[in-house]
Each structure stands twice: as C-alpha cells, then as structure tokens.
C-alpha cells in the first residue's frame, strides 16, 4: 500500500520570508545612514552574519582587546536553530568587518531580544557608530515583524548611558524572565506606530 504524505512547506516559506525581512531592513538602514551623510556612509554595507563575516571576525578581531568575549559562531547557531525569525547583522566598511549584532523575537514576537552588539576593537572606521547603526536596524526589524519592544539583554554597564540617550530604559526582568533568560538587567524601548 502506498501512502501519500504531505510535505510541510511552511518552515522553508517562513525562513525565506524572514530572510527577506532581514535583507530589506539591512538595505533600508544603509540608505538611512547614507541619507544623513552620503560621503561618510558610502562604504557602509550591512549583511547577515555569513561564513565570510565569521571568517573576517576571526582574522580581523583577534588582536584587539574585546569589550566582551562573545562566542559569535555558537550564539548564531543557537539562534538560527531556535526559529527562522532570528535577527542578525554584520556591519561593514568596505572589506572591514566593523560590527555584529544578534538576537531574536520572543515566541509571540511581542519583543525582539538583542543578545549581543559588538564592535571591532581595532581598525574600525565606524567604531563610534556601531551601536546607533545596530539599534536603528534592530528597531526597524522589530517593527517589520510587528514586535512592540526591543530588549537589550544584559547591556554592558559602560554603554548604558548610550542606550538611555537612544531612548532605552534600564530595568530588571520580572521573575519569569530572570529564570528563563538568567539575565540581571535589560534596556528596553517601545517601537512602532504607538511611539
């Protein structure tokens, strides 16, 4: 007896849709910065964190003192396995990898959690701009997937003032989030049309 099975095509469709959302946000963020200063941001590109980006991370960031010691490859693999709606970005100045950001939405997509933002510690033409670029793009992605808030997970203490200036509020998690995420603090911001 032959039994016909129906192939579940929803996951590949979701992966493709979210990939399209990420790419559109990457492009729109580049255009927004070029609109602010065309000559300064002409060499800016934003991509997903690809194998090329990880290779550049290993070769270009291995000499400087890193502010955080994040295992980007492991974290990227974890987020990609969790759900197709993960958020990632690699920020480039020509061939120099200047910054990385990674996270993903809550189960119901009400929040976009940003687990990490990091700048290349050396030879970085956009060093002071990694956080503004990453925040703008992350907020745009949150709006695209209909998240109401962006949550920066355990923001580095030395950068909290920068996040506050960008409109974020620092707060402790509720008991549920403290248990699930094991995080001590968040910096949060409401995004979207309700702002």
Image (spheres, grey):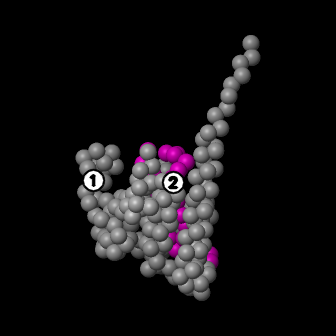
Give neighbour class at mark 2: few <14, some 14-19, many 20+ (Cα, 10 Å). Answer: some
**Quarter of image, res 152:** bottom left
Residue 46 location (% of width, % of height): 58, 69
The residue identified by callout 1 is 173
Q: Tell me the element at label 1.
A: loop
**Quarter of image, res 93:** bottom right
Q: Residue at x 53, y 82 (%)?
A: 36
Residue 175 location (% of width, % of height): 25, 47
Quadrant holding the C terminus? bottom left
Foreground tag (1 vs 2):
2
Q: Is residue 176 magenta?
A: no
Q: What is the number of the mark on residue 47?
A: none
Which region of the structure is painted magenta?
Answer: 80-107
Q: CA distance from mark 1 to mark 2?
A: 23 Å
Residue 121 location (% of width, % of height): 45, 76
Q: Is residue 98 magenta?
A: yes
The residue identified by callout 2 is 145
Work out whether 3 lies above or below 7. Answer: above
- For marks 1 and 2, the one nearer the N-term is 2
Give neighbour class at mark 1: few <14, some 14-19, many 20+ (Cα, 10 Å). Answer: some
């Amino acid at each position: 007896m032959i039994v016909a099975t129906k192939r579940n095509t929803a996951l590949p469709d979701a992966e493709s849709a979210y990939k399209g959302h990420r790419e559109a946000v990457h492009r729109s963020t580049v255009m927004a910065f070029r609109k602010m200063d065309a000559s300064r941001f002409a060499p800016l590109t934003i991509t997903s964190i690809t194998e090329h980006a990880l290779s550049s991370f290993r070769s270009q960031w291995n000499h400087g003192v890193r502010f955080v010691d994040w295992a980007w490859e492991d974290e990227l693999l974890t987020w990609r396995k969790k759900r197709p709606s993960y958020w990632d970005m690699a920020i480039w100045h020509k061939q120099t990898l200047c910054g990385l950001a990674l996270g993903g939405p809550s189960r119901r997509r009400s929040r976009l959690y940003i687990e990490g933002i990091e700048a290349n510690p050396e030879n970085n033409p956009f060093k002071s701009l990694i956080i503004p670029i990453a925040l703008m793009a992350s907020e745009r992605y949150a709006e695209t997937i209909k998240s109401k808030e962006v949550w920066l997970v355990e923001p580095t203490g030395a950068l909290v003032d920068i996040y506050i200036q960008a409109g974020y509020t620092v707060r402790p998690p509720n008991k549920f989030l403290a248990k699930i995420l094991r995080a001590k603090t968040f910096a949060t911001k409401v995004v979207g049309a309700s702002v």
